[in-house]
Amino acid sequence: MPPLPWGQGGSGMDDEGLLSSEREKQAALEDEAFDWVARLSGGEPSPELRNAFAAWRAESPLHEAAAARAEALWEDLGRTEAAALHRLERARSAAAGSFRAGRGLSLSRRHFLAGGLAASAVLALGGLGAQEFLAPHADLETAKGERRRADLPDGSRLWLNTGSAVSLNFDDAERRVTLHRGEAFFEVAPVPARPFTVVAEGCTARSASAVFALRCLHKDGMAARLTVASGKVEAEAPGGRSAMVGPDEALLVPAGKGPFRLAAADAGSELAWRRGKLIFNRRPFGAVVEEVSRFVPERILVLSDDLRRLEVTGVFDLERPEELLPAMELILPISVTRLPFVTLVS
């Protein structure tokens, strides 16, 4: 394999990688719990909403622990800015100690809410770049809010979306990419003797020549989403599941053993992030905020279910992600309030 400008790395996962995966799952639970707490704190919550949260936190001890953590963090938002800065300094010291000891550090959104690692603090830790906080086995990775393009050894091209990491294995026998997290877009150069393979979350996507994207989801019971812009991509998963995905189609891959879900997709709009745009066509505001949250350092909380259901249509510029919500404030009946480490939408 020719030398790569970003270095070579393996595609396997050792014990450290497995532990990292468990930490990410717990971080996702804590983020979900914080959403529950925010909704319950917005006005007078209905008995149905309270009961739903109680049922959610009773699902497992991990759910209960995440709920308790979220309630503590919500109370923490009311502290003074000076206290938040004090906690930030402690977090920076702890993070620096972790790196000196050779340990990894998981950066989930709850760190920001607790007065943890704001983006500027991440870059200030002992001269470390933000990318050093990411996947230890990756050949190419992006920090939150960053997007990158790479030319691959076979002539294919790869774009990484925000907060993504991949490992590469290109030799005379195969062209293989492992997506550790995030989202990647591929323009596959035709090499019929060596199909181009991308692996993520138990899904294997394979094509001799196509334009497609694969995204790790961890949402609503789904593990990955495959979207094809042109050509055809064969998708496989454990248990003998397989599907052929064509242009403007998307395949949802479940986290368990359930069936694939194939649906129509507007690939041009869905994958516009590659061109530095977010395009929404009558999307619920709640879903729009989820997308915007992938690109900005602060946590965004929508405090009303009615606002979550608002439909949004528009084209927004990713080159200035800090202006995404202010731009929406001009066209939607919303009010944006920025606090340390969190933005509230009401």
Image (cartoon, helix red, strand yellow):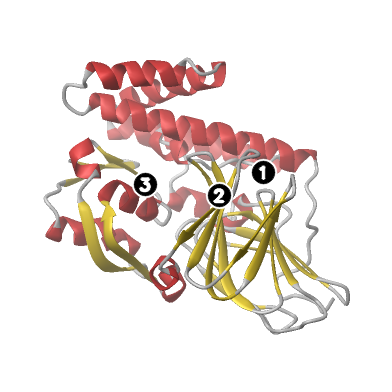
- Judged left or right of residue 191, residue 273 is left
Residue at 75% over, 68% down: 7
Rendered image quadrant of residue 160: bottom right
> Label 2 to label 1, Cα distance in Å?
9 Å
Q: Earlier in the sequence, mark 2 or mark 1?
A: 1
Q: Which residue is labeled 3 in the image? A: 298
Rendered location of residue 230, percent (x, y): 54, 77
Q: Which residue is labeled 1 in the image? A: 99
Q: The disc labelled 1 sits on which kind of residue?
A: Phe
- Residue 125 is labelled as 2
Q: The disc labelled 3 sits on which kind of residue?
A: Glu
Between 162 and 123, the one lying in front of the other is 162
Rendered image quadrant of residue 306: top left
Rendered location of residue 71, percent (x, y): 37, 21
Residue at 76% over, 74% down: 195
Q: Secondary structure at mark 2?
A: loop
